[in-house]
Image: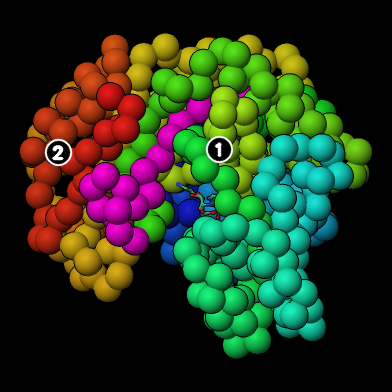
Amino acid sequence: MNILILGSGGREHTLAWKLNQSKKLDKLFIAPGNAGTAQIGTNLNIDVNDFQSIKEAVLKYAIKMIIIGPEDPLVNGIHDFIVSDNELQQVAVIGPKKAGAQLEGSKDFSKQFMERHNIPTAKYKSFTNVTLEEGYQFLEELQAPYVLKADGLAAGKGVLILNSLEKARSELKEMLSNQKFGKASSKVVIEEFLDGIEMSCFVLTDGKNYISLPNAKDYKRIGEADTGLNTGGMGAISPVPFADATFLKKVEERIIKPTINGLQKDNIDYQGFIFIGLIKVNNEPLVIEYNVRLGDPETEVIIPRLKTDLLDIFIATAEQKLDTITIEFDKRSVTTVMLVSGGYPEAYQKGKEISGIEAVKSSIVFHAGTIRKEDKTVSNGGRVIAVTSFGETIEEALEQSYESIENIKFGDMYYRKDIGFDLI
Ligand code: AMP
Ligand code: GLY
């Protein structure tokens, strides 16, 4: 079977690495991919939102399944585009249609979904420019810190957590009246601040059945001890030690099952991943957000733990037969540490030559922002390389990742030396 993966990050390299182990795989294509995916399959120089070019590639290379990495093309309706095209109808898509992708594409939609299906989450209300005054009133009812969320996709920057009422009021106005996040903030969700510890769980559903993947915790801030600006993620660990069996049972009964049943009740046909961002408050799980894809760098720790053939799992998803699959996971701990370009998540330089990857023997090196240029691998993004390791404990896995990193070098390379610091 010929497969196309859309995306270019560490998540997509990890998926490519895993699918490449399947006997059922014939040819693997990645669009646009990175220097890591180029070693496993064929990179196609196509933007993930250029549906027409994707169609041409699917026909040209006889692709039978497309796996969508990032949220953008899903929210833009790539799945709907493929199933409504006569020439593409037989192509399987892993990733929800536009209606399901709204779980990530609209915070207001996802909050209404949770409310409708009794899924625990922070108390909230949504406002537009017309209801700005009511937004101010709602802020008065809450206590600091105040959580303001742009309704639409804002490249991970649309959530503001503000310590004073005055600042919350001015930011609300900036978002609604002055389009701080463009169209994405024409509606704003204001919600109660939840104080707890965050983690993520991952589910794959075929629209009827679901399987749970391992849980993970990522480290979003650029600075050690979780300080500084938010990034896409600087590292991750799996499994999460504070998620014991009792807690995970609550997650399954109160969150995962009602989410899957809720999609069915709402007639939202969904084949793909659901990434549930959770917060544990007084031992109880609440949903912070839904994403309609796998996380990055969470994928770099959960997929290596998967022992089952990933292509078998995807085929079962497309055929709505996930109930026939038994999945197995490696019980060991896995960690990943991201090597990033100095300056990230603000301005940084690209094109730095990367050396030493081949010297890493005891970790898996997943490429993120990398590209091949004149026989060299050079940096091509903020997050450049993820170094994934196994261990009997988180400590052991981390030690291995940090030892492996010693081999890798590129100009202005930066990484956090304290991934997992709060759990050890
Ligand atoms: P989101 O894009 O909704 O995941 O929000 C980004 C980040 O903001 C989350 O990972 C949390 O760290 C934080 N956050 C979002 N909502 C809340 C909330 N209600 N209470 C506390 N922190 C929150
Ligand atoms: N690591 C967080 C995300 O992928 O959204």
Q: Position of residue 215 (x, y in %)?
A: 51, 27
Q: Are marks 2 and 1 in contact (CB under 8 Å)?
A: no
Mark 1: give few (<14), some (14-19) or many (20+) Cα within 10 Å.
many
Element carrying mark 2: helix
Say whether residue 326 is left or right of residue 369: right
Which residue does the numbered mark 2 point to in the structure image?
405
Which residue does the numbered mark 1 point to in the structure image?
279
Q: Which residues are magenta?
A: 211-229
- Amino acid carrying label 2: it is Ile
Which numbered disc, 2 or 1, marks the residue closer to the eye? Answer: 1
- Amino acid carrying label 1: it is Ile
Identify which residue is drawn at 30% across, 70% down: 346
Q: Position of residue 218 (x, y in %)?
A: 40, 40
Q: Tell me if I can see residue 374 in this picture.
A: no
- Ligand 1 within 8 Å of disc 1? The answer is yes
Which of these two is toward me, 383 or 31? 383
Q: How is the image coloured?
A: rainbow
